[in-house]
Image (cartoon, rainbow, N blue to C red):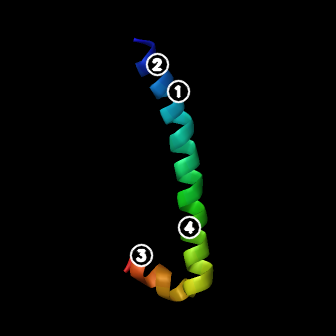
Amino acid sequence: MSDDDDFALYSDARQRRIKAVAWVVILSLILVGGGATVLSLLFG
């Protein structure tokens, strides 16, 4: 079924985009919310 192949290719590109967006969100939260507070919450 070609639908599965198309979805696999789309999913791969989508995963990369989601990962990039996630990093941007994490970095912006650290910058906006104060690095020390966010890091202490993340790493205990």
Residues at marks 1 and 3, CA–CA distance in whole angstroms: 33 Å
Q: Residue 9 has which mark?
A: 1
**Hey, which quadrant is residue 40 in on the image?**
bottom left
Say what amino acid the circle numbered 4 marks.
Val
Q: Is residue 30 above or below residue 18?
A: below
Q: Quadrant of the N terminus?
A: top left
Chain-order first, disc 1 or disc 3? 1
Type of amino acid at the residue the image marks with label 2: Asp
Q: Which residue is mark 3?
A: 42
Residue 19 image point, x, y percent: 53, 51
User: On the image, which quarter does residue 25 sit in?
Assistant: bottom right
How far apart, in angstroms, are the residues tagged by discs 4 and 2?
Answer: 30 Å
Residue 25 is marked as 4
Where is residue 24? Give x, y as percent.
61, 64
Element class at badge 4? helix
Marks 1 & 2, CB-CB < 8 Å contact: yes
Q: Residue at x 62, y 80 (%)?
A: 31
Q: Which residue is mark 2?
A: 5
The residue at 57%/61% (across/down) is 23
- In primary-sequence order, the first of circles 4 and 1 is 1
Give the crowd class for mark 1: few <14, some 14-19, many >=20 residues within 10 Å.
Answer: few
- Going by the numbered disc 1, the residue's amino acid type is Leu
Coordinates of residue 20 in the picture (x, y in percent): 59, 53
How many residues crowd around disc 3 within 10 Å: few (fewer than 14), some, or many (20 or more)? few
